[in-house]
């Protein structure tokens, strides 16, 4: 095989060869290691080539999915959607005379919060738990995402049926924080299931039967809910390190 | 440089002590963790991935003892982990998924697109980068798992049964990727396939019932076997011999 004269290789490396010359040299270089080894591309040319390639690679990719996942993992989406739907149904029945919204609002966020940090509900939980972002800040970020979707829905709907936010907003925040607090002990999913079940069994059920709101949901109970919020928040902060490891339970 | 160091490491899986007193001293190179089902390989990998807190013993990763949140964060920036059960988000494309993982790994935003491109290219999924994960075959999904593990160019790469479901050509490509990474990376690969170890590993760690039965080169493992043992290759015979000896 004839080889490319060194002078031609040099001018090719400088980017000075054109047309058929460049094509022939390039084809030969592709198959001949010995000529390739003589090819010394100056850093300046190399930099230009790389910067062009990088331009291609860094083209901004506005993936809606990724931008959303930064706030709420895809595993949470169906649960948040379900909650919004249930809320809407509650409002419809409330227009017919029940008081479901006020009764259900406190536990509305817990399903979404459970999905934020659960092995069973988030398929990617194990790889997420191994990343530097795993921890209380990520869990809080996801919790805020749940509330950011839910509260704007709850507020106008509550207003529509004439329920004052004071009645359900504090319980809602208390349940959210309590789910995380209890979650540091038994896993967030179990905590969510436990708290929601207890609430439904001991408060929602009886209220539906007696057709009256429990004292707990009267505005005068706000102090109790505030204390619950504060206690739960302290537990969450003290036990924050559990959110840097695999969620316990499922 | 020692990348992973463990002294008397014990890790619980549920109520069982699935890793029961293991000492490790791993440097760059490919380390195979070999053992029968239930040996404790996955539990060990999880502890090294820092997602399980050891019940006792010391674990030092990349020269850092894992105590504070900050030390954990720093170490994790330089870890890549593929779990045995790799779960993912079906609606994401390959690129989106790896990009999201890069974000979780706190990579600088400007580096992410390039790093994602390289990782996807390295596992041979360049032409499927914009396909949704739900449309990929099982082996391809596994390769997405490898891509997300290597996207941050980790110093410690932990792969739990990475070759499960890969076809022969992909297995070879995967071993080449390991060889390539091994120069500046401590790669720990768990497997129950002796041939994986034979083809790709420098060092073997044989586990059973949460303990290490053998630690050394592949040639030493082969030397442990006698012709009378079950197995088709010297390595397999070495493997059976050591397990038999431990059972006695
Ligand atoms: N979540 C759990 N709860 C209770 N026991 C567990 C749990 N996970 C693992 N174990 C037990 O711990 C031991 C080690 O399991 P591990 O998954 O680490 O084994 P392995 O070597 O990875 O096995 P395989 O080759 O099947 O993947 C087994 O006896 C298993 O039953
Ligand atoms: Mg396993």
Image (spheres, coloured by chain):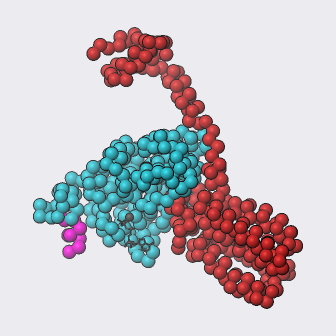
Chain colours: A red, B cyan
Is A123 inside the magenta-drawn segment?
Answer: no
Q: In terms of image quadrants, where is residue B246? A: bottom left
Residue lying furthest front: A96
The secondary structure making up most of the magenta span is: helix
- Residue B169 coordinates in the image, percent (x, y): 33, 45
For residue A90, above or below residue B143: below
Specify the quarter for ligand 1: bottom left
Question: Is A97 displayed left or right of B185 in the figure?
Answer: right
Question: Residue at image x 31%, y 61%?
Answer: B192
Q: In terms of image quadrants, where is residue A62? A: top right
Q: In terms of image quadrants, where is residue A220? A: bottom right
Question: Is A232 displayed left or right of B96 in the figure?
Answer: right
- Residue B232 coordinates in the image, percent (x, y): 18, 58
Quadrant position of the C terminus of chain B in the picture: bottom left
Question: Residue at image x 49%, y 16%?
Answer: A15
- Confirm whether residue B212 shows in the render: no
For residue A120, above or below residue B125: below
For residue A20, above or below residue B15: above
- Residue B216 coordinates in the image, percent (x, y): 26, 56
Tell me the magenta residue range: B241-248
Question: Residue at image x 34%, y 23%?
Answer: A31
């Amino acid at each position: 095989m004839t080889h490319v004269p060194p002078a031609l290789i040099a001018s090719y490396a400088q980017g000075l060869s054109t047309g058929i010359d460049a094509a022939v040299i390039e084809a030969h270089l592709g198959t001949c290691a010995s000529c390739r080894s003589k090819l010394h591309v100056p850093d300046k040319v190399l930099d230009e080539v790389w910067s062009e390639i990088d331009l291609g690679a860094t083209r901004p990719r506005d993936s809606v999915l990724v931008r959303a996942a930064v706030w709420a993992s895809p595993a949470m989406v169906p649960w948040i959607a379900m909650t919004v739907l249930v809320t809407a149904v509650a409002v419809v029945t409330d227009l017919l005379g029940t008081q479901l919204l006020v009764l259900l609002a406190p536990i509305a966020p817990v399903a979404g919060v459970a999905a934020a940090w659960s092995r069973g509900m988030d398929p990617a939980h194990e790889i997420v738990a191994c990343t530097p972002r795993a921890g209380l800040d990520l869990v809080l970020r996801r919790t805020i995402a749940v509330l950011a979707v839910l509260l704007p829905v709850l507020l106008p709907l509550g207003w529509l049926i004439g329920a004052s936010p004071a009645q359900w907003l504090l319980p809602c925040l208390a349940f959210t924080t309590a789910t995380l607090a209890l979650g540091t002990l038994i896993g967030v999913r179990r905590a969510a299931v436990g708290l929601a079940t207890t609430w439904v069994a001991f408060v929602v059920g009886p209220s539906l039967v007696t057709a009256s709101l429990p004292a707990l949901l009267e505005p005068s109970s706000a102090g109790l809910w505030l204390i619950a919020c504060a206690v739960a928040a302290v537990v969450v902060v003290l036990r924050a390190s559990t959110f840097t490891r695999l969620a316990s339970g499922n | 440089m020692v990348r992973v160091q463990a002294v008397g490491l014990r890790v619980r899986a549920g109520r069982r002590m699935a890793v029961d007193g293991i000492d490790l001293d791993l440097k760059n190179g490919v380390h195979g963790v070999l053992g029968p089902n239930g040996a404790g390989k996955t539990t060990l990998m999880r502890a090294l991935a820092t997602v399980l807190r050891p019940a006792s013993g010391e674990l030092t990763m990349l020269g850092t003892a894992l105590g504070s949140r900050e030390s954990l964060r720093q170490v994790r920036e330089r870890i890549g982990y593929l779990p045995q059960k790799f779960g993912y988000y079906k609606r994401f494309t390959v690129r989106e998924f790896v990009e999201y993982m890069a974000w979780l790994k706190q990579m600088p935003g400007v580096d992410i697109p390039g790093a994602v491109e390289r990782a996807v290219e390295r596992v041979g999924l360049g032409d499927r980068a914009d396909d949704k994960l739900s449309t990929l075959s099982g082996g391809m999904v596994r390769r997405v798992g490898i891509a997300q593990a290597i996207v941050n160019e980790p110093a410690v790469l932990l792969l739990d049964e990475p070759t499960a479901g890969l076809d022969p050509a992909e297995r070879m490509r995967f071993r080449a990727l390991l060889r390539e990474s091994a120069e500046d990376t401590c790669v720990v690969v768990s497997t129950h396939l002796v041939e994986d170890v034979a083809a790709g590993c420098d060092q073997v760690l044989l586990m059973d019932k949460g303990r290490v039965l053998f630690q050394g080169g592949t040639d030493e493992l082969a030397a442990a076997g006698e012709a009378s043992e079950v197995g088709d290759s010297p390595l397999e015979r070495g493997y059976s011999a050591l397990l038999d000896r431990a059972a006695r």
